[in-house]
Image (tube, rainbow, N blue to C red):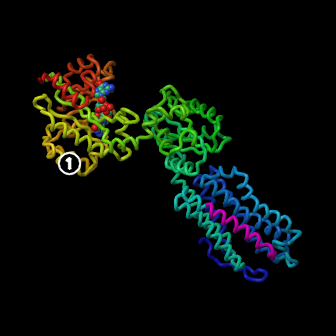
Amino acid sequence: MIHTVVIRVKGYKMEKILYFDYCTIPVLIIVLFATLMRKMTKGLANRLFITIIILSCINTVFDLGMEFLNGDDQNVLLSVCCYGYYTLRNGTVVLYALFIFAITRTWYRLKSAALKVAIAAPYAVILVLLFTNPFTNKIFVISDANVCERGDWLIVFYGITAVYAVGELLYLIYCKRFLNFDKWVALMSLLVLSFIAVMVQLFYPHVLLEMFANSIALLLVALLVLRPEEMLSSSTVGLLSWKAYKMELKKIIATKQPVQIAVVRFVNAYEILTYLGEDRYYSYMRSVAEQVNQLYKKVYFELYFEHPDNMYIVFDSCDDKLEDETQKLYPLMKDRMKEIDSSGIIPEPRICMLRYPKDLERYEDIVILGHKFHGLIPYEQTFCRASDIIGTKDFEIGSNMDSILNRALTRQSFEMYYQPIYSLKEKKFVSAEALIRLNDLEHGFISPAVFIPAAESKGLILPIGDFVLESVYRFISELDFEKLGLKYIEVNLSVAQCLQKDLPQKIEELEEKYHVTPDKINFEITETTYENIGDVIHENLQAITARGYTFSLDDYGTGYSNIQRVSRLPLKIIKIDKTMVDDMDTPDGMTIMRNTVRMMKEIKKELVVEGVEQAEPLEKLAAMNCDYIQGFYFSRPLPQKEFVRFIMEHNGVM
Ligand code: C2E
Ligand code: MG
Ligand code: MG
């Protein structure tokens, strides 16, 4: 407590304890300052909250004024305090009801006339009673001795406050599912504390506890309900966070409130971030946010930022005009960059306008759309409506990935294909890469480039990885490698698999079950595995290498390829990515490929070049002394039987 001095002032009949009121003012001022300092001024709920604090502060002054002026000559001032106190005391109760609607995001319900009347009518009764009080003296009366005495009908005020309180309590109970538990408790505390204080004051009128209890409850609300640290995506950007967006989305769906969402995706965000550096990138984002604020001055919306490339503008209404306005964002965002940087770097925002619940109803679908829409429209298209995308095969697959993967696992609709790998020196096929395929009953063939990352993010990659290992070991056990001229099969290992503590044990079990020796398998890992390297991965790779397996680094030339890292790791093979092959038709691309091959050979790595489709790069790669070629030029990935037939035919096995 800030003020602990007990002051007793002579009342007209009793000694009134005012120290609670004294404490109230500093508490409210602290709450107000904290709210303003944390910049919690935008949005309906914040504004209502600030109004409640200010009015509560003024009301406490009126409350004190009433007590100080009792028995004084200042008759007019005493009247002002009395009328002010009773007007505001009940006014804040109404504002609190509105605050609950705003914070639970159910404000749109107030469009209902019946609800408006239900909220306004009791307060209207209070105002009528107060206006007529000078003639009726039923609420309070200022006696000849200048003392404010309670009137017979004052109890009506308490009754009306109780009606509001019960209404708010029931509504909060109904809204529990839209709020976190601690927030809900903080909001309930305001009601409970106020109720206790009113009861105390009703039976012990000399203890002025009401305003103090109110201020403590407001403090709780400020601490637990309005938490900027939870909302701001970063203090540097100063926008609401991705987490806040997801919470908001859940609330919107729980309340079925129709909204319109503009998703802005900066497709080259990473490049801009790297070029500008964090500070300037965030000031660009801030300036974009300002632009958005100016553009939609007349409508209510919230702006969220998902680091580093997505922005979400959630409008409380659905309106065709908003779509027209939103199309203006694209040139505005490009212009803003010129103010931040004059070198000519151009941001590439893509905007998608979505209507809830008309276009999409499920939370997951809305999140997926925000992340995927830019890949589902032509690159040149800068604006789209969600309704244009929904229904396309890619979107259908993306939004049903969970059920597709589960279905595939239970029905075993995965299948392993094998893509032959050609040895330039031995002039025959010596190995193959095992590649998983998924043929869904409903959606047909789905590329692993789509479902593998989805399975990784949904925690389903491990059972898929187990299926791959089991199938490959079984397949190898059925083959006569020597006769076919094969040396080993390459198997992709995902990061999650490498993180499994029992991976070496699983491999050992498969070896025993299928009588497969380690020299027949080479595991492919990517650089992401090394970025994630921790004790488990390190130990796993060591244990697997110790058993006699070899590793290759997949997709070299994408991501952050680092030659120093390559040289330090126990890798036998480096797989050069298709993108580097595609670049070979430019002089620079050729130079890069030639030097990469030379460098890898010098550090004694074997090289597989992936994605060779034409004879021309093949000849050039052969001239560079590459070891192996994998690509559509020789063969696409093939089902087991076709693969065996292919190898027999091309390796001259009769
Ligand atoms: P990756 O491991 O780099 O596999 C090579 C990909 O390049 C395969 O795509 C293959 O079909 C494709 N490819 C090979 N030659 C050519 C060519 O000449 N032209 C073109 N356009 N493409 C070529 P796929 O099978 O679609 O697999 C994509 C990615 O999915 C794989 O890239 C790998 O990261 C992942 N993946 C596939 N199967 C598995 C698996 O069993 N386990 C794990 N963890 N990941 C897998
Ligand atoms: Mg691979
Ligand atoms: Mg690859």
Residue 283 in view here = no
Residue under the image location 18 percent in, 45 percent down:
510
Mark 1, other Cα within 10 Å: few <14 / some 14–19 / many ≥20:
some
Residue drawn at the location 15% of the way across and 46% of the way down: 513
Q: Splitting the image into 4 quarters, where does residue 202 fall?
A: bottom right
**Residue tagged by mark 1?**
504
Instruction: From the viewer's side, name the closer residue of 234 and 379.
Output: 379
| Whether residue 233 is situated above or below residue 67 in the rendered picture | above
Q: Which residue is drawn at 62% across and 66% down?
A: 190
Q: Would you say 194 lies left or right of 525 here?
A: right
| Ligand 2 location (quadrant) | top left
In the image, 136 versus 444, the foreground residue is 444
The C terminus - image quarter: top left
Give the x, y percent position of residue 399.
Answer: 45, 40
Q: Residues in magenta?
A: 149-171
Residue 330: x %, y % from top left: 56, 31
Q: For the stretch drawn in magenta, what is the main secondary structure?
A: helix
* Picture layout, residue 93 above or below residue 311: below
Quadrant of the image for the N terminus?
bottom right
Image x and y of residue 123, in percent: 76, 62
The three-letter amino acid code for the residue at tag 1 is Pro
Q: Is the residue 258 above or below the residue 438 in the image?
A: below
Can residue 158 be found in the magenta stretch? yes
Could you tell whether 589 is left or right of 72 in the image? Answer: left
